[in-house]
Amino acid sequence: MVTTPNYKNLNPIEKIRQSPVLRYESVSAKDVRDATDVERKIGLKVTYSNFDESTGCLNWNLYNFSSNNTYFALLRGTNLVPPYWFLEYYTEVYKALDIIQFLNSENLKPNYIYTVGLIEYNNHGNRNYAGVFYVPDSTKLTLEECGFSANNLPNVYKIVPVRYLKTEKYLVEYNFMEIIDYALQTGIFVQNAPFPIYQQQVAKFRVNLNDGWINPRGFVKMNWITSFIYKHL
């Protein structure tokens, strides 16, 4: 069974507006000059900017200078909230509000929408939803995230390459209290929230960082047995 995370009393930072900022730009010469030697060597960089205390929103800037990778997840945290994967929380809220799109084998390079994949550390259950973003070589991707405050700004943030494996359909179990918690924090009533157990087809990616798994969900690959069980719920 899915249980409430131990970190629940800290309130996750993650909030996404109905029409969030998402912008692709070419990496500039200044961007390269401003990068450290290490960032230029690995070809990756992430910063945040434009924090607005009145809205709690800021922009994440994901740079791919010359990396061989093109798909990335963002791990970040604050002094009050431990690091976790961007879009790991409230994924079902954003699904209901039509703010995100689940990546799949037919649509791995979408533009101008927040995208979610299933990231997996190994084959033993370390997997969850996360924002997975396509950032081609010599490109900067700017994303907006809200929920921050002046005393709760990012102090840990990493851009983490992920590798596409395959697209599969899962029976997903999540904690419906997440929907209620979001409504209480934001005042936004979430219509059309998925049932606590629902089907989802999603692209799966391998990540080489076993960290950030704070929002448990159950993922069972669909087959004739799980399809039969789901049909008779």
Image (spheres, grey):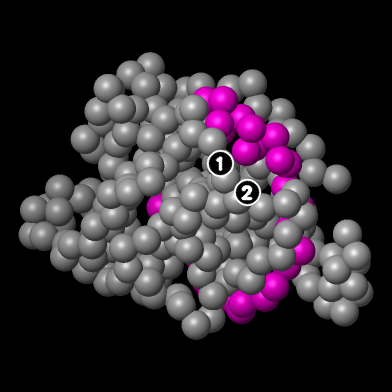
- Left or right placement of residue 155 versus residue 39 in this view: right
Q: Residue at x 88, y 59 (%)?
A: 233
Q: Residue at x 58, y 71 (%)?
A: 203
Q: Give the camera-side residue of 12 and 195.
A: 195
Q: Are marks 1 and 2 in contact (CB under 8 Å)?
A: yes
Residue 89 image point, x, y percent: 57, 43
Neighbours of disc 2 within 10 Å: few (<14), some (14-19), many (20+): some
Disc 1 element: loop
* Mark pair 1, 2: CA separation: 6 Å
Instruction: Specify whether residue 13 is in view.
Output: yes
Neighbours of disc 1 within 10 Å: few (<14), some (14-19), many (20+): some
Residue at mark 2: 193
Residue at mark 1: 190
What kind of residue is marked 1?
Val
Q: Residue at x 54, y 75 (%)?
A: 104
Disc 2 element: loop
Q: Which residues are magenta?
A: 159-185
The stretch drawn in magenta includes residue 175: yes
- Left or right placement of residue 183 versus residue 229 in this view: left
Q: Quadrant of residue 65?
A: bottom left
Rendered view: 216 above or below 165: above
Instruction: Specify whether residue 132 is in view.
Output: no
Residue 9 image point, x, y percent: 64, 21
Residue 107 image point, x, y percent: 46, 78
